[in-house]
Structures are given as C-alpha cells and as structure tokens.
C-alpha cells in the first residue's frame, strides 16, 4: 500500500511540475493588452478588460494599468494605408500604444525577433517593426547593456486589413 501511495504522489508531483512549467511558458506573452485587436475589438470590450478609462476623448482613451499606460484609438483611418481604405466605426479600436511603466528586457516579449525589422531611430533608440502583424516597439540599452523595451504599438495586421477594409 505504501508503494502505491508513493507512486501516486510521485506521479502527481510530476504532473504538477509539468503544469507549472507550461503555465510559466504560456505566461510569456500573456500581456494584459494582447486581448485587444485593431479593427476587431470594440470599445466596450476594452472597458471590460481595463475598466473605465482614466481619460476618455472622442477618438481615444487612456488606461493606467500595472504594466503601463495604454492609449487606445477608436474609429480613425490609418493614413499610411495605400492599397486599402479602412474606416472603422467610432467604437472600434483602430490602433493602440503601450508606454511601459517599467522597461522590460527584449527577451521578455517572447517573440521571434527574426520576423521583425530593426532600424536605429537615433544613437540610443532602436525601432522594431513587424508590419505584417502590425506590431512595433522601441528599445534602448540599459545600464547593464541589455536591450530594454519601453513602448509597444499595435496597428491592424495585414490579415485584418484585407478582411475589414475596402481595396482602393
């Protein structure tokens, strides 16, 4: 009987540890703002995620969270679009920016950086872009020389532009 109990305890421990490892790995990119999808998410959903905005304007809202300030823009057409006319409704997220409260190491994003283009903005700041997914972020070098992320921007992905916008 003791052996069965020890074996059961051992199996349970392995199961619990594997669950912890998966949770830790899955937590990588589970940032609170990743629920927002430009051209898809509505203002009511954003408020459901973050509560009432700190500042609320006609076309934008600001939410102060533990991660940072999130600026959400609604119903604005992206002037950069050349091939498509995107006219989101007044209550649809058109884009959003996050100004992180505390800069995080670039590895903390957990993204495949091979898919991003890196361009120096000036001597101290680099800008990464993955236009296909609509993700942009800026980095700077910390005191220890590590590259740290300070802001992240989300624009509509190519897929959502094709599905939600009209070809010019």
Image (cartoon, helix red, strand yellow):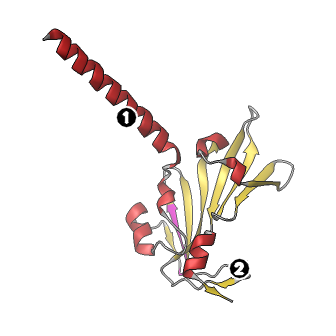
Badge 2: residue crowd in 10 Å (few <14, some 14–19, many ≥20): few
Residue 19's disc is 1
Q: Main secondary structure of the magenta part?
A: strand
Q: Is residue 75 something one can see in this rendering?
A: no
Residues packed near mark 1 inside 10 Å, few (<14), some (14 to 19) or many (20 plus): few
Q: Nearer the viewer, residue 46 or 5?
A: 5
Residue 105: x %, y % from top left = 65, 40
> Magenta segment, which residues?
58-63
In this rendering, the answer to whether 167 lies above or below 54 is below
Report the front residue among 168 and 68.
168
**The one of 10 and 66 positioned closer to us in this rendering:** 10
Report the disc number at residue 81.
Answer: 2
Can residue 94 be seen from the camera position used here? Answer: yes
Residue drawn at the location 75% of the way across and 34% of the way down: 143
**Residue 130: x and y, percent?**
69, 60
Compared to residue 104, the image places residue 37 above or below, namely below
Residue 150 pos. (x, y %):
66, 50
């Amino acid at each position: 009987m003791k052996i069965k109990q020890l074996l059961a305890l051992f199996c349970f421990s392995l199961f619990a540890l594997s669950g912890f490892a998966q949770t830790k790995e899955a937590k990588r990119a589970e940032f609170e703002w990743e629920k927002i999808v430009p051209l898809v998410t509505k203002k009511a959903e954003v408020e459901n995620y973050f509560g009432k905005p700190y500042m609320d304007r006609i076309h934008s809202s600001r939410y102060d969270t533990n991660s940072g300030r999130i600026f959400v823009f609604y119903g604005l057409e992206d002037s950069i679009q050349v091939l498509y006319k995107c006219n989101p409704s007044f209550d649809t997220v058109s884009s959003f920016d996050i100004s992180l409260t505390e800069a995080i190491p670039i590895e903390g994003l957990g993204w495949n950086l091979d898919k991003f283009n890196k361009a120096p903005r000036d001597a101290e700041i680099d800008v990464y872009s993955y236009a296909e997914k609509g993700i942009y972020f800026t980095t700077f070098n910390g005191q220890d020389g590590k590259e740290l992320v300070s802001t992240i921007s989300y624009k509509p992905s190519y897929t959502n532009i094709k599905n939600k916008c009209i070809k010019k």
